[in-house]
């Protein structure tokens, strides 16, 4: 009977040790996540500036595309006119 109790206690000790190892791993991952979050929270201005720069560049690209569309339509009209003149 004492041997059975010792075996059960050893098994419980092993399970507790494995659980402790898992908890330690979870704590380490949590710490890394907290550090990443803190790092991102320290630089909100950088993220806003990046967003503003991207928005400005997208607007610039839109304007350029509009100009290209206008020039292309004029060219098509001129090509059609030259074909008609022949």
Image (tube, rainbow, N blue to C red):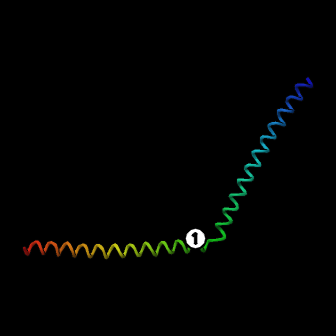
In the picture as drawn, the residue positioned furthest to the top comes out as 1
Measured as percent of width and height from the top left, residue 18 is found at 78, 40
Quadrant of the image containing the N terminus: top right
**Which residue is located at x 41 percent, y 76 percent?**
60
Measured as percent of width and height from the top left, residue 21 is found at 77, 44
Tell me where residue 48 sits by quadrant.
Answer: bottom right
**Which residue is located at x 82 percent, y 32 percent?**
11
On screen, residue 39 versus residue 15, left or right, reads: left
Q: Nearer the viewer, residue 1 or 74?
A: 74
Is residue 27 positioned above or below 36 on the image?
above
Tell me where residue 68 sits by quadrant.
Answer: bottom left
**Which residue is located at x 35 percent, y 75 percent?**
64
Quadrant of the image containing the C terminus: bottom left
Tell me where residue 19 sits by quadrant.
Answer: top right
Is residue 24 positioned above or below 55 on the image?
above
Q: Nearer the viewer, residue 41 or 73?
A: 73
* Residue that label 1 marks: 47
On screen, residue 81 versus residue 8, left or right, reads: left
Measured as percent of width and height from the top left, residue 30 is found at 71, 55
């Amino acid at each position: 009977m004492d041997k059975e109790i010792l075996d059960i206690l050893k098994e419980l000790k092993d399970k507790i040790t494995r659980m402790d190892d898992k908890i330690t791993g979870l704590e380490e991952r949590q710490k890394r996540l907290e550090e990443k979050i803190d790092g991102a929270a320290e630089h909100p201005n950088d993220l806003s500036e990046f967003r503003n720069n991207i928005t400005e560049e997208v607007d610039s690209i839109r304007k350029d595309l509009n100009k290209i569309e206008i020039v292309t339509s004029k060219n098509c009209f001129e090509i059609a006119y030259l074909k008609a003149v022949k």
